[in-house]
Image: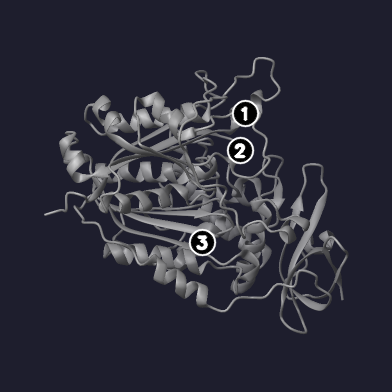
């Protein structure tokens, strides 16, 4: 006997508006999210108008163009994204939420509002997000550019950017404002811990992502539905140019997409009242939300204890082992985001179940902060068809925030998670101290080289001071760092402050 307040996912929807389609409609982020929301209502198998009228909360995932202060919004935007979506589906929710920045957002919102439903604090909840990044780029300077501005006003619980600790002045001063360079530092740290050469690790990344391309090729909503071999992924070419060592273009998230996704959840009592067939109900058996230390304070830059703990706790709460999962989707903005969690769960890159249900962010597409809404939608659809249990891992920042969910067709009551205690344990572990102005003898801990489209290169180093072990970030010699015949990690150097940034020279 389930508690009437047990939360269930009852509807999911996805939408896409690719530039390459002959039916391209130049849809805005709101329109894509609304199209996905309409699909989610229809997916319930019940009368859509009645369900829309029953929606109590609409929570929106923040678009990329409003995820950092001062970002350009070339085609305009809604001043109340969730209300714009609600208006298009005939809903009049009492509460509207705009979530913080980060790819953890969709799964975190599921976890948060499932708990609110179980506590009797929410009824039917629609979660929705959309990105029209390709359209905005294509038409920003066009004479006939569309206007996506919507002034709908009304109450809005805007939670802000949520970027505290993720992009510091020190990181920005050294060219680490963008995620590819930050993740590249983490990736090279993992490579060094494993004792792999650059060539060997390039093969690891390519072998990981080659099966993802096969999944994307079979997904009609994928932005890059092409099968690529591991050799193609590992080989530098005009189309697969270097981005930030060790990454080439094919190994990083594809954010220039037009995609939307939505998830509808509610208590079982409401689902029954609205006539939603039980065959549509999917239960959240396990869940967790944890945060990693800020990048420069992490003891091991090549691992993510928070992501590992969140994944393990969600599975433990569900009472499942990783071998009992039917489907798995690990957030895949960069290889290490997959590998860090796969390491923790004992998953191999060639696991026959696969590590993605969509094709992953480099191949299905990385629609801003909303990718995992697509992963949840695909997981729910897959479980309905086959039964079983599905895992979704959602990552935000530079492996900074991690939210995990375990979905199942087995009727399962709501169980609160123990994330606060786990977070306390993570926060109590020793941290590394940063030297923002560093001087003296040091050793390179990890590095990357950023490659510009114009051929210019910028070397970036994270190192440890010899005298006290404090960590620093510095500019480094790009030619040395990029030389395939060298191994920068472990190299002795000297570092000195230049006023605006630290500078590393070979000792």
- Specify whether residue 196 is in view: no
Question: Are there few (<14), some (14-19), or many (20+) residues within 10 Å of tag 2?
Answer: some
Q: Is residue 226 left or right of residue 192?
A: left
View extreme (front): residue: 155
Q: Which mark is residue 65?
A: 2
Q: Which mark is residue 136?
A: 1
Instruction: Determine contact: label 1, label 2, CB under 8 Å.
Output: yes
Q: Which residue is mark 3?
A: 339
Q: Which quadrant holds residue 493?
A: bottom right
Q: Is residue 497 left or right of residue 444?
A: right
- Label 3 or label 2, whichever lies nearer to me, is 2
Real-space Cα distance between discs 1 and 2?
Answer: 10 Å
> Which of pointers 3 and 2 lies earlier in the amino acid sequence?
2
Identify which residue is drawn at 71% across, 56% down.
176
Real-space Cα distance between discs 3 and 1?
Answer: 32 Å
Question: Are there few (<14), some (14-19), or many (20+) residues within 10 Å of tag 3?
Answer: many
Q: Position of residue 505 (x, y in %)?
A: 87, 69
> Which of pointers 3 and 1 lies earlier in the amino acid sequence?
1
View extreme (bottom): residue: 467
| SS for callout 2 | helix
Identify which residue is drawn at 82% across, 63% down.
476
Instruction: Determine contact: label 3, label 1, CB under 8 Å.
Output: no
Instruction: Determine contact: label 3, label 2, CB under 8 Å.
Output: no
Q: Is residue 322 left or right of residue 304?
A: left
């Amino acid at each position: 006997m389930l508690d009437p307040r047990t939360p269930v996912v009852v509807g999911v929807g996805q939408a896409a508006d690719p530039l390459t389609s002959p039916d391209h409609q130049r849809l805005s982020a709101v329109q894509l999210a609304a199209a996905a929301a309409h699909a989610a209502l229809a997916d319930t198998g019940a009368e859509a108008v009645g369900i829309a009228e029953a929606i109590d909360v609409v929570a929106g995932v923040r678009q990329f163009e409003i995820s950092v202060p001062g970002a350009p919004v070339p085609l305009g935007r809604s001043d109340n994204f969730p209300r714009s979506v609600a208006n298009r589906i005939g809903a009049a929710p009492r509460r509207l939420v705009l979530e913080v920045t980060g790819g953890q957002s969709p799964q975190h919102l599921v976890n948060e509002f499932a708990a609110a439903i179980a506590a009797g604090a929410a009824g039917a909840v629609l979660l929705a997000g959309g990105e029209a990044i390709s359209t905005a780029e294509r038409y920003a300077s066009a004479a006939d550019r569309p206007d996506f501005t919507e002034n709908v006003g009304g109450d809005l619980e805007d939670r802000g950017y949520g970027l505290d600790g993720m992009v510091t002045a020190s990181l920005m001063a050294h060219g680490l404002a963008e995620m590819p360079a930050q993740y590249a530092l983490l990736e090279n740290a993992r490579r060094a811990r494993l004792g792999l050469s650059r060539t060997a690790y390039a093969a690891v990344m390519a072998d990981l992502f080659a099966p993802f391309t096969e999944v994307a090729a079979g997904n009609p909503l994928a932005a890059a539905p092409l099968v690529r071999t591991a050799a193609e992924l590992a080989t530098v070419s005009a189309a697969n140019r270097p981005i930030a060592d060790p990454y080439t273009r094919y190994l990083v998230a594809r954010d220039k997409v037009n995609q939307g996704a939505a998830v509808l959840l509610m208590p079982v009592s409401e689902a029954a009242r609205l006539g939603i067939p039980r065959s549509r109900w999917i239960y959240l058996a396990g869940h967790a939300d944890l945060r990693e230390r800020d990048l420069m304070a992490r003891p091991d830059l090549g691992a993510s204890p928070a992501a590992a703990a969140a994944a393990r706790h969600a599975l433990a709460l569900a009472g499942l082992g990783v071998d009992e999962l039917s489907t798995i989707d690990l957030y895949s903005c960069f290889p290490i985001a997959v590998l860090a969690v796969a390491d923790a769960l004992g998953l191999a890159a060639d696991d026959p179940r696969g590590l993605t249900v969509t094709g992953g962010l480099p191949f299905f597409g990385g629609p801003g902060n909303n990718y995992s809404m697509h992963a949840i939608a695909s997981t729910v659809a897959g479980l309905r068809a086959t039964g079983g249990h599905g895992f979704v891992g959602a990552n935000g920042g530079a492996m900074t925030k991690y939210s995990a969910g375990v979905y199942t067709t087995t009727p399962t009551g709501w169980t609160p998670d123990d994330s606060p205690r786990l977070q306390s344990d993570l926060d109590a572990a020793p941290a590394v101290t940063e030297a923002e102005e560093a001087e003296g003898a040091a050793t390179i801990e990890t590095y990357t080289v950023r490659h510009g489209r114009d051929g210019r290169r910028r070397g970036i180093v994270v190192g440890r001071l010899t005298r006290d072990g404090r960590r620093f970030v510095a500019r480094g010699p790009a030619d040395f760092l990029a030389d395939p015949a060298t191994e920068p990690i472990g190299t002795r150097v000297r570092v000195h402050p230049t006023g605006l940034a630290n500078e590393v020279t070979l000792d």
